[in-house]
Image (tube, coloured by chain):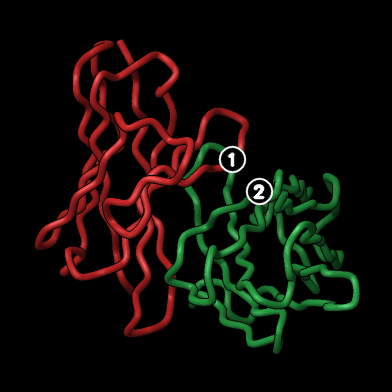
Amino acid sequence: EVQLLQSGAEVMKAGESLKISCQGVGYTFTDYWIAWVRQMPGKGLESMGFIFPGDSDTRYSPSFQGQVTISADRSISTVYLQWSSLKASDSAKYFCARHSGQSIGDPHDSWGQGTLVSVSS
Amino acid sequence: SFVLTQPPSVSEAPGRTARITCGGDNIGTKRVHWYQQKSGQAPVVVIYFGSDRPSGIPERFSGSRSGNTATLTITGVEAGDEADYYCQVWDNSRDLVVFGGGTKLTVL
C-alpha cells in the first residue's frame, strides 16, 4: 500500500529554522514526483513546488520561490520542506502528495496526513 | 500565472444534482483534476484528466470540460458528499500546477 508519512506538528517562533519531512513507503520512491501543498487556516490548497527524487529535479511555484527549500534523501525515501527563517504567516498545514505518474500533470493519488506548523511572533 | 475560478459555495438538496464549475483560460485543453476534502482530512482525487474516475469513487461523480470551463457533477447528492472541492490544472506552458480557490458543497 502506498503511504506518505509526514513528521509531527511543530510549534515555532518567528525567525527560527524548520525542516519537515515526508517518507514514501510501499512504492519505488525514485519514480514519482512529490509535491508540497500549503493550506492556511480556513483557506484553500496552494501548490508550493515539487521534486523528482530520482534526480532531485525541483520546481517551485512563483509565490514560494526563494521562501522555502525542497529536497530529498533517496537513501531513506524522504522528501523535505525547509524554512531558514519562519514568519508568522507560515502558520499552516502542509501536505505532501505523490503524483500518480512521471509527470507533474498527473493527479495526486496519495497524500500525507499533513503537518501543522504554528509560528508565533 | 494561470488562474482558476470556482464559486465559493454550492448548496443542493439530497438526491438532486450538484454542479461545481472551474473557470480558466482554455481549460478544455488542459489536464484537470478534482479533489474532495472533508473537514480535517487530506484531499482525495475524485476525477482526473477531466472525466476519469478512480476506483472506489462512486459513479455519481463525473467530470467534463469544454472551452474555458470544467465541471464536476455529483448526481444524487448525499449527506456524505458535503466537503470542499478543488479543481487543479497543470499549466504546461510554465510547468506549474495550480489549484482553484475551492468550493464548499453544502447538502441541505
Q: Nearer the viewer, residue B57 or B100?
A: B57
User: What percent of the width, then of the height, locates residue A101?
Assistant: 52, 70
Q: Secondary structure at mark 1?
A: loop
Q: Nearer the viewer, residue B97 or A98?
A: A98
Q: Residues within 10 Å of mark 1 (few under 14, many from 20)?
A: few
**What chain is colored red?**
B
State the CA–CA distance, disc 1 to disc 2. Answer: 6 Å
Q: Quadrant of residue A41?
A: top right
Q: Residues within 10 Å of mark 2 (few under 14, many from 20)?
A: some
Q: Residue at x 20, y 55 (%)?
A: B23
Residue B101 in sight: no
Q: Secondary structure at mark 2?
A: strand
Q: Is residue B32 left or right of residue B40?
A: left
Dot placed on the residue nearer the N-terminal end, 1 or 2: 1
Callout 2 amino acid: Ala
User: What percent of the width, then of the height, locates residue B79?
Assistant: 40, 14
**What chain is colored green?**
A
Tag 1 residue: A41
Q: Is residue B66 left or right of residue A94?
A: left
Tag 2 residue: A92
Q: Residue at x 58, y 47 (%)?
A: A40
Are the two marked residues, 1 and 2, in contact with CB atoms closer than 8 angstroms?
A: yes
Count the labels in the image.
Answer: 2
Q: Is residue A9 above or below residue A15?
A: above
Q: Residue at x 55, y 54 (%)?
A: A109
Q: Are marks 1 and 2 on the same chain?
A: yes
Q: Nearer the viewer, residue A3 or A83?
A: A3
Q: Residue at x 20, y 16 (%)?
A: B16
Which chain's residue wears label 2?
A
